[in-house]
Image: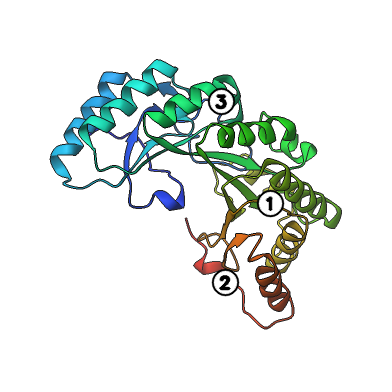
Amino acid sequence: MQYEGNIFRPPSEAYSLIVQATIGCAHNECTFCSMFKDKQFRIRKVSEVIADLEEARGYYSNVGRIFLADGDALVLKQEELLEILLKIQTLFPECARVGIYGSPQDVLRKGVSDLAALKTAGLGIVYIGAESGSDRILKQIKKGATAAEITEAIKTIEASGVDASATFISGLAGADEADWREHAEATGRMISAAQPSYVGLLTLMVEPLAPIHEEIRAGRFKLLSPEGVVAETLLLLENTNVTKDCVFRSNHASNYLSLKGTLPGDKARMIRQLTDALGGKYGLKDERLRML
């Protein structure tokens, strides 16, 4: 099998077969992200992807999940994705779910009908980097999409029958209280409006290849403290009101405090956990233990 560069995938795809449909990320301008800065984006030939799948079939007797990498493989033409998904159905009849990263632009370009066709062919989940509900912060991090576009993209995924997993980043607004409060409140409102099936809340970690690293070094961006991250998360949850089950996870290696629950049922419990942490009842993860 062929794989270029480092492997990046959602936490829930840890045990999935990972096959690159694209190399790198088509956007690749987000200031906080260093994942694909060393890759030149390109779309792989379908024949190459299928060759990898055929080779993998020879290695593995049981493949429960498959993840199509890299950063936004949903950018592929509809007919190319369908060909890959149908090949997966043929080669891996036991595969219960295929996952993929998708940018808001990719999702909106495809629309409900194309996504529904992909679901019929085996696509089960689209991971979308929402990052923040604040337009000002999205512009600041060069996300390339507005809050309204991201919200509509999540709703489009859900309307197609595919699960949407939206990822947000704690600490992305920096240490200024007015900024992190804006980030938290706007993100809670986005989750409430979009109603994704899954929400993943990571905490900002900066590597040298990320453009924001230079902003920190120059003093233009100040990192939010661990206690500030907990307070921001508390405010986010207080502003989140969903009417259907939404799996909420903030138990990534980057997080200072592990949270797991399903909204709205576990909202009060998680808020108590955050309040207790701010009151000193729980210790926060040591900085040395935060690693990707």
> Which of the 4 image quarters holds residue 45?
top left
Residue tagged by mark 2? Answer: 285
Please tell me which residue is depicted at 39% across the width and 16% down the height of the picture: 79
Q: In the image, residue 98 lies at what x, y percent?
A: 38, 38
Left or right of residue 130, residue 123 in this image: left
Q: Locate residue 237 relative to residue 162 in the image: left or right.
A: right
Is residue 17 at least partly visible in the picture?
yes
* Mark number displayed over residue 112: 3
Question: CA–CA distance between discs 2 and 1?
Answer: 32 Å
Contact flag, marks 2 and 1 (Cβ < 8 Å): no
Q: Which mark sits nearer the N-terminus, 2 or 1?
A: 1
Going by the numbered disc 3, the residue's amino acid type is: Val
Task: Specify the amino acid type for callout 2.
Answer: Lys
SS assignment at label 1: loop
Front-most of 287 and 1?
1
On the image, the x and y values in percent for residue 292 come to 47, 55
Inter-mark Cα distance, 2 to 3: 41 Å
* Residue at the extreme left of the image, as rendered: 58
Between 187 and 82, the residue placed more toward the observer is 82
Q: Which residue carries the number 1 mark?
A: 243
Foreground tag (2 vs 3): 3
Secondary structure at badge 2 equals loop
Q: Badge 1: few (under 14), some or many (20 or more) residues near its Cα, within 10 Å?
A: few
What residue type is disc 1 on?
Thr
